[in-house]
Image (cartoon, coloured by chain):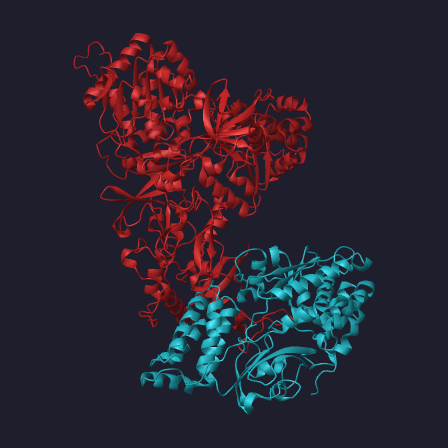
Chain colours: A red, B cyan
Amino acid sequence: MPDVTLIIDGQTVTVPAGTNIVDAARSTEVSIPVFCYHPKLRPVGMCRMCLVEVWTPRIDPATRQPVLGEDGKPVLALMMGKLQPGCVPPVSDGMVVKTVTDKVQFAQKGQLEFLLSSHPLDCPVCDKGGECPLQNLTMQFGPSTSRFDYADKVHFEKPIALGDTIYLDRERCILCSRCVRFQDDIAGDPVLGFDNRGRAWEIISKSDPPFDSKFSGNTTDICPVGALTSADFRFKSRVWEVRSVPTICTHCPVGCNLTFDMRHNQLMRVMPRENDYVNEIWNCDKGRFGMRFAESGDRLTTPLIRRNGKLVEASWEEALQLVGERLAELRDDAGSQALAGLAAPDLSNEDLFLFGKLLHDTLGSPNLDHRVGVAGEAAIDDLPAAYGVGQGTNLLELGKGTAVLVFGADPEEEAPLYLLRLRGILARGGDVTVVNPYATKLEHAATRSLRVRPGAEQALALALLKVVIDEALDTTFAERLRDTDQLRRILGEYTLAQLAEAAGVAEEQIQAGARAFAQAEHGIIIYGRHALAGGNDLSNTLANLALLCGKVGRANSGLIALTSGGNTRGAIDMGVRPRGGLSAAEYWPAASAGTLRGMYIAGLDPARQSAAAAAALGNLEFLVVQDIFLTATAELAHVVLPTATLFERDGTFTNAERRVQRSRQARPASAGQPAPWEIFQRVAQAIPVAVPAGNSNGSDRAAGWGYVVASDVADEISRKVAGYSSAGYTSLGVTRQSWGRQANDDVYYDGTSYINTEGVGVQISSRADDPKASFSLSRVAYPGAAAGEGIALLPVVRAYDGGDWARGSKLQPRMVPAHVVLSHADAARIGIGVGETVRIETVAGSASLPAQIDTGLAEGVALLPLVAGIAAGDLLTGAVTAARIERAE
Amino acid sequence: MPPLTEHIVLRDLDVPNIGDQEVYIQNGGYEALRIALKEKTPADVMTMVKDAGLRGRGGAGFPAGVKWGFLPKGVYPRYLLCNCDESEPGTFNNHQIVDRNPHQLIEGIILAAYAIECHTAFIYVRGEFAHAARTLQRAVDQAYEKGFLGKDILGSGFELDIIVHRGAGAYICGEETALMESLEGKIGQPRLKPPFPAVAGLYGKPTIINNVETLTNVPMIVRKGVEWYRTFGTERSPGTKVFSLSGHVNRPGNYEVPFGTPLRELIEADYYGGGMRNGNQVKIVVPGGASAAWLTAAQLDVTMDYEALAAAGTMLGSGGVIVLDETVSAVEVAYKMDEFFKHESCGKCTPCREGTHFLVKVLHRLNHGGGRQGDIPILHDVYNQMAGNCFCLLGESAVVPIRSALKLFPHEFEEAIARATAGANGANGKHAIALVTH
């Protein structure tokens, strides 16, 4: 858009057309006070705080030219003859804005006097005190006294719970509607509204349960007064007493930048930290309120060793000695192949790198994985390393000209911030096609939704490819592609009609989706749990689609996989994946058969998810479990090692867009539990090595294990791991200015913890970023028959899954109970009502669960939320499991 | 100026039972519709209304035909809204039209819809008008039965549905954008403008919104022609206006008069107000509903048209003429009127929500023997903090009574304060009037 030049308080300002006056002023030294306006929300002009004089050149109606005065300058006219809210009218050329006139100051004083005439002025007991725009603006612009001397301030019951996590104090509320607009426009959960009118106008929750949104916490940040406060932080601390520590959320692959506000080494609250590349200024409630687990009294504090069948406390020296010796014994006795390791995909890159080094390099085992090895979980998918979104990708800048294909994913549950980011792309004019076998929240906002038949996802992906090839929609990339003939041959065997029929989606819908994607300037494919559970064929087909359309190897195009865990990308990059050995799913038969004899599990709990895995673990000769809680798996261990949490250690994490970000230690671990990487080092150091002949000193320390701090490991990662050379700690600390120079000026938008002084991280390149790279299309196959007889049971991710992260969280009441979701038709056929128990039988096992009914679900499809109480491994056979569901007797 | 021998709008006064469809048809009803659909293009109808100089009777007085011309070309669907949320204190003319002459309104809506090429029209009826809404619905049903509404009206191929929608009794829903919000099922509060309704109104579509009285004029313009219409009223305010005369006159009621009729005639003529009760003197005239600035006895020679009233510093507004005699207290009148605005403030913007409350607080104490030194400057400050700073005209309207009262009768405020500080009880010793608000 062309730029517009105007004058604000005597300063000439040039800003893009469409900018409003408040934002234009923010690019200079001029502060126009606001309450209802927020740069992330649509302006409403309600609070009348930003009233300014706006003068525009008078236009001669006949000539449409500015009228010139005697001095030859344009004659200016006061817009509408009165003050204008600066948040509403867009700037125009020749405009003159005056923000410091008697009239304006009278109005500003007046609005503040009005606002305070209803306000309780209970700042001394208000959580917002110290970062409150009403306080700040009153000091700067308001009258020092009020002439409204009545005791009848607005009175409401205060505060009321607006949900499990948010309290509303209606007396403090200045009715700016920021929270309502956030929920309506940004989050897409229109659960807040207004009731009554006039001075009795009040915010209400319209949902059941109240404030039913995964993004509710953000409203407390943007609330310009203390009306919305979080149950998590109420009365915990004054905001100026906290020490703000920058961290990264590891609950999902978004990698939201967080601030842990600490006082006396206790977590007071979690706030989002601004990073336009990742989470803007938002985060989800799981990240905000789901961080209390570290303070749980159930934390493991000392190592445990199994003696006489019981786990008993032991010293670190003893435990580490035992682990080192036993692992070495097993290696020497049964060979490295008999050892295996599992490390959680929410550990840091430093942890995972050293875990790989310990298992693979020091112990020689090829058996590594970051999954628990139960049916229906995600395949290891390394495609984003090759075709991941190009360096410089920023979803915030995407809109018109961008097409996103969201395939087999439920962003709201799997990676909540992506729902906001995608809604933003849609709001800015982008195109989003959703392909999923069941309804998701994103679908409501999406450009089109393709409800694929479960098990026929590959048919649909091939159909999209076929449209692109048949219509020759995009050939810009063709010269860099090899093996297109093979793909053409496979696709030539089917008509679009056949593929569409198999997928259960209308041809026109497929064509529309394929065309939108192929013809967009930027194209991104986001695929999630359901797609990943279907195995690598599907993701290869999706990669082919991106390749064929030239949507790789540049910024804002490529693949994004929504994996479980906050650092699955890092786990894959650091080599915590089968390295020529067994995968997690193969561990359990091998352990049961006795070919696997020792195992090291860090942060995962396979025993909870599968009886077979639990039995296999029980068969091991030596099991080390390293965790923060005594999990079901830990209870089977021979040695249990307690470890530090995210709070208590430094480290880096790689998010779904391959952005490496650094998280800082917020406090020392209360019982001195070491960081996971430190434990791996100490275990490595405890492994006896054969003393080389002639070395009389005889060091029993393994060579190459001399890391002192996490950055020592990071240095080695940047030397040894492809793509990570650019991700040293120094580069990760580079900050970037976001939405305007005064974005973090607490006079306006509060939330001092937003400030990102610790860097926005580095997005590492994908292989496709190399302009000389050429690519092979993957061999893809037409899918076999869909799942067998019966109802197609699909595992689905639920953010509020009742995992260990939820311990001590205010979100506890929102945890999803174990249940199965049936279609209305199936429930009617079975004769089941809501909440009644059904019996589910599959070839893997059976379970009895209460049923919920979803009228939007297709007949013959049932959903199994993967939450606490569900042992997926005992019920599922894959991404789609044929199940018999009957009324439980 | 003699009274009308033939009414344009209040034809129920000329033709008994014109509310019956048969009677309406026998007296030229739906003839304009036949003429328009058979002989005229939509543009012709729009031009006629433009040429007739028909101005919006809802308050702003904007030329209706010009407004219709603001619709963006080629954008469909479009909606026509008839604003029948008549809630302005002292105004009750729409009610009579809807209750007694509903078919002429319906015909006007059909003609307007034809002119702007719209196929769905809504009549937003004030919640309290229960009986009138039923009358209107019955008339609409009859119009469907006769083929004046629905598909292929009178064989012309033109199609129109009219939906009668009852509000829930909020004054703010008479504001055009708040009316649209309410009609869409949302809380009735004004929207930010621009976009203006003609560009993005109901459901975000181009929308024309006209007052009941405005639309009721249209059939007569189309049937009898522009020249005939312009024989009434003044050059710039052609036609007639139905004034709702209330207060201390001997004959309160709705009077349809040509624009340009002197206010004095409206109050004093035997065929209109019939003079003041008990021969009392006029003290305050509110010429256009509670939102209009006050006139005094010295200004009774002003003529009742848009231009003359604007020149007198007030407005024609909704045509609700409230005449008050010397028995009233200006403080109390201002208090009563601002209490209304406070009660109706939607709460969306700060100055209206808090300012009306603040004003009423001070006015209440002044009116109840609790005035204090310094109250007058506070009142001036508060209304000045509101004036020009509110989101919509409701807050701006609330400024009007207190500003008028302070300007015209400052001594009454001073006396109220003096009396209070001297320990006397009660207001000026004068009794309250009840404002007619239906």
Most foreground residue, A210 or A226: A210
Q: Whole-percent x and y of residue A425?
A: 52, 44
Which residue extends farthest top? A333
Q: Is residue A265 above or below residue A320?
A: below
Q: Which residue is drawn at 50% across and 77% down?
A: B434
Q: In which quadrant of the rendered image does the N terminus of chain A lie? A: bottom right
Which residue extends farthest left? A697
Task: Report the side of B192 relative to A161 (left or right).
Answer: right
* The quarter of the displayed image where residue B369 is located: bottom left
Q: Does residue B188 appear in the picture of this structure?
A: yes
Most foreground residue, B81 or A492: B81
Task: Report the side of A541 relative to B163 (left or right).
Answer: left
Q: Which residue is drawn at 58% across and 41% down?
A: A521
Most foreground residue, B197 or B172: B172
Q: Is residue A641 above or below residue A176?
A: above
Q: Whole-percent x and y of residue B321?
A: 58, 80
Q: Is residue A278 above or below residue A62?
A: above
Q: Does residue A40 appear in the picture of this structure?
A: no
Q: Whole-percent x and y of residue A548?
A: 59, 30
Q: Whole-percent x and y of residue B209?
A: 64, 64
Q: How many labels does the image show?
A: 0
